[in-house]
Image (cartoon, rainbow, N blue to C red):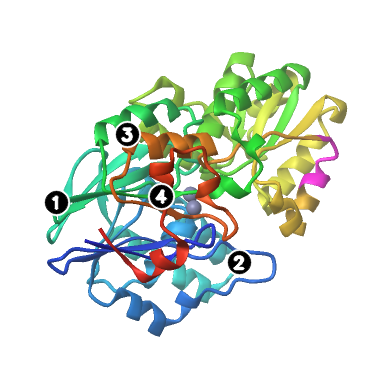
Amino acid sequence: MKITIHRGTNQIGGCITEICSEGGTKILIDLGRNLPSENNDYDEYDNPATLSALLEGVEAVIYTHNHGDHVGFFANIPEHIPQYMGAMGREVMQNTLEEQLNTAQRAGRTQRAEELMGAIARLGEFRTYATARTFHIGDIAITPYFVSHSAADAHMLLVECDRKRVLHTGDFRDHGFTGKGLTPTLVRIGQVDALIIEGTMLSRDGSASKSEYQIQQEMLELMGRYKNIFVVCSSTNFDRLAGLYQDTLKIGRPFVCDKYQKRQLDTLRKYSGKHSWYYNVRNALPMSLNAKSLHKNMFEQGFTMVVRNNANFRKWIGFIKEHIDLAETLCIYSQYLGYLEEQPSLREFVDSFGCKVEYIHTSGHASPEAIEEVCRTLNPRSAIIPIHKDATSDFHTLNLPDELKAKIIAADTAQLGIPI
Ligand SMILES: [Zn+2]
Ligand SMILES: [Zn+2]
C-alpha cells in the first residue's frame, strides 16, 4: 500500500489524500478546496488539466465529511468516478445547495443557478456509507466510524488492503456532545499500521477547546440575564444549535429561525433524533412578518433567534427592534471570530442589532491532548502522518513517547508518497 498526501501537510484545509493498493486500486480520501482567505481564492485544482491529472486512475473519492475544505471539488469530478459520504452529511449539503439555488434564482443570477443545479444533480449521484459498515473499492476495504466534529455526520475512515490497516481521522474532536465516543471507537478499531491525523489546533489558541457542554452552560446563564437573544452561528453546527434549543426550552421561550434553518434541523432530527432526545429539535419556529401569534409570544416571553446575514433577517430584526428593549437584548456571536474581520458585511450586520455582543464559541477540532490520545491508543506500527495543519506546527512538540515520535513522517516525505 502507498499513501500520498497531495495536499494538507503544510496547510489547514484543502485536504487530498491518495491511497493505492499493490494490486493497483487507487482511491482519494477528501478532495477539498483551499479555505477562502481574505484576498486569495486561488486553488491550483480549479484548473481542469490539474484536476484530471490528479484523478487519473482514481476509482472512488471518499469524503470524511461535508465541509468545503474536504468536499469542495465534488461537482468537478467526472461522472464515472463514484463519490461516497454519510447519508446525513449528503442531505445537509443538499439543503444548503438548494437554499443557495433559491437565492441565486431570486437574484436573477442565471449562470450561478445553472452551476448550482449541476452540483445538486452530481450530489444526487453520491453513494452513501454508514458507520461501522465496510464497503469495498477493488481490493481496498473501507470502514467509516462516526466521530464528533463541527460538521454533521463526520467519519474517520479505516482503510485496509495488502494486509495493512490505515486510519484517516478526517476532522475530529473529543469535546462535542458525542465526543466521549472517541476512545471506545479507537479501542474498537485497534492497532493500525499508519495513522493519518489532523493537527489544526497545534497552531490555534488552546482555550478554544471548551466543551460543547460548557458552551451550553454559558449560553443558559446568559439567557437567564437577557430576555431576547440573537445568535450568529453556522446553520449546520448541530451540537451548537441543539444546545441552544435545549437551553431555550429549559427557560421556556420560543426558539426562532428561518425556513432554511428549520429544514436543516429537520434533517438533524430525522437522522440523530432516534439516537438521542437531545437532537430532537421539533419545535423550532420559522419567522415571518405574518406570524402574529409567534410575535406575541416573542415580545411577551423573550426569545432565542438564530440569525443569518441576509435580507430577510435584516428586515425581521428591524421589525423586532421596534417591539423590544435593547437593554434586555444580547447578541451571542458563536462562530469563528476571524469572519468578523474577513467579512465587513457580517460586522455591519452584527453592529446593526444595536445591543451588547458576547463571543461564545469552541472549535470543531481536536485539542493537542485529544491528538495525543489517538496516537497512543492506535499505537501505529510504522507511520504517523500529520495533515490539516499549518506548516509551522510540529507533531514533535506533542507529549508522546519517543518510539511514537520516531514514526512521525515529515511533510515533504508524505507528499512524495510513503510505502506502508
Ligand atoms: Zn477541515
Ligand atoms: Zn471540517
Identified by mark 4, the residue type is: Ala
Tell me the residue that label 2 is attached to.
107
Segment colored magenta: 350-356
Circle 1 sits in a helix, a strand or a loop, which is it? loop
Identify the residue position indicated by label 1 in the image.
Answer: 163
The disc label shown at residue 406, or none: 4
> Would you identify the image quadrant in which residue 218 lies?
top right
Question: Front-most of 235 and 33?
Answer: 33
Label ID, residue 186? 3
User: Is residue 368 magenta-colored?
Assistant: no
Crowd rating for badge 1 (residues with CA inside 10 Å; few <14, some 14–19, many 20+): few
What residue appears at the point 69 percent right and 29 percent down from the top-left corner? 295
**Disc 2 Cβ-to-ligand 2 distance below 8 Å:** no
Seen from the viewer's position, the closer of residues 60 and 95 is 60
State the residue in front, 420 or 266: 420
Does label 2 or label 1 sit earlier along the sequence?
2
Q: Give the CA distance from mark 2 to mark 3.
A: 48 Å
Where does the image place residue 180, in percent across and percent down from the top left?
42, 25
Q: Secondary structure at mark 3?
A: helix
Q: Residue at x 33, y 71 (%)?
A: 77
Instruction: Give the residue type at disc 3.
Output: Leu
Vertical side of 394 occupied by 101: above or below: below
Mark 2, secondary structure of its residue:
loop
